[in-house]
């Protein structure tokens, strides 16, 4: 079954972008390719910190996260080679659209004093990165079972070649950008 947001993209966003940008072919229209959610965990915390972060990330995304290990030792960060230091999930297709819908509709408005997200976080190639302060803004997380607040990075990868095209795509998809 198609997600509600993919139907919106197919029926409203794609025709609007074709008219707005003057694309002649459907395959020229930018689209979401994947969303990567990353939770970095400090090496100084206890051993269960990475397991707690992975459990929270699995509850948020519905997918089992991959545990990333350090490639080399860094003494200043108390990090040793092959020590778990982060967990991440890559979402594509229906899971990606469902997560994006939950992010825009429920999670972002739950941030305290939220006035929109910065429109300046594009990387120059049409991808958008967003830092979230903690995982408790998602309704899937039970506040009573949280041991520590954990921030996360969300990277939205689009097929748009420029930042302007990606900004138009995300704005039409419902991303609440802050006005200047």
Image: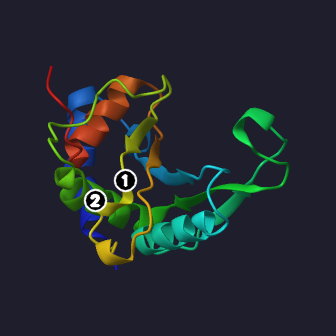
- Please name the residue that numbered disc 2 is placed on: 137
**Could you say where residue 39 lies in the image, as x and y percent from the top left?**
53, 53
For the point 40% across and 70% down, the residue is: 146
Residue 11 in view: no
Mark 1 and mark 2: Cα distance apart in space:
7 Å
For the point 48% across and 40% down, the residue is: 159
**In front here: 1 or 21?**
1
Q: Quadrant of residue 95?
A: bottom left
| Quadrant for the N terminus in the image | bottom left
Is the C-beta separation of discs 1 and 2 under 8 Å?
yes
**Could you say where residue 68 lies in the image, as x and y percent from the top left?**
70, 56
**Could you say where residue 114 lies in the image, as x and y percent from the top left?**
16, 42
Q: Left or right of 99: which side holds 82?
A: right
Of all residues shown, which one is farthest toward the bottom?
1
For the point 27% across and 63% down, the residue is: 102
For the point 15% across and 19% down, the residue is: 180
Q: How is the image coloured?
A: rainbow
Q: Secondary structure at mark 1?
A: loop
Crowding around mark 1 (Cα neighbors within 10 Å: few <14, some 14 to 19, many 20+) is some
Q: Left or right of 159: which side holds 118?
A: left
Crowding around mark 2 (Cα neighbors within 10 Å: few <14, some 14 to 19, many 20+) is some
Residue 61 in view: yes
Q: Establish if 83 lies above or below 72.
A: below
Q: Which mark is residue 134?
A: 1
**In front here: 148 or 98?**
148
**In front here: 8 or 101?**
101
Q: Establish if 136 lies above or below 25.
A: below
Q: Secondary structure at mark 2?
A: helix
**Could you say where residue 20 lies in the image, as x and y percent from the top left?**
21, 30
């Amino acid at each position: 079954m198609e997600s509600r947001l993919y139907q919106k993209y197919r029926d409203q966003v794609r025709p609007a972008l074709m008219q707005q940008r003057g694309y002649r072919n459907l395959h020229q229209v930018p689209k979401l390719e994947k969303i990567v959610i990353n939770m970095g965990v400090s090496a100084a915390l206890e051993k269960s910190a990475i397991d707690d972060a992975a459990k929270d990330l699995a509850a948020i995304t519905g997918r089992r996260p991959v545990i990333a290990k350090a490639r080399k030792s860094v003494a200043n960060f108390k990090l040793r080679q092959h020590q778990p230091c982060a967990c991440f999930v890559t979402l594509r297709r229906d899971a990606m659209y469902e997560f994006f819908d939950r992010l825009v509709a429920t999670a972002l408005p739950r941030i305290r004093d939220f006035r929109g997200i910065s429109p300046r976080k594009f990387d120059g190639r049409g991808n958008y990165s967003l830092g979230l302060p903690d995982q408790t803004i998602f309704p899937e997380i039970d506040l009573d079972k949280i041991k520590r607040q954990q921030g996360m990075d969300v990277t939205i990868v689009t097929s748009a070649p420029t930042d302007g095209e990606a900004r138009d795509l995300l704005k039409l998809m419902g991303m609440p950008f802050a006005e200047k």
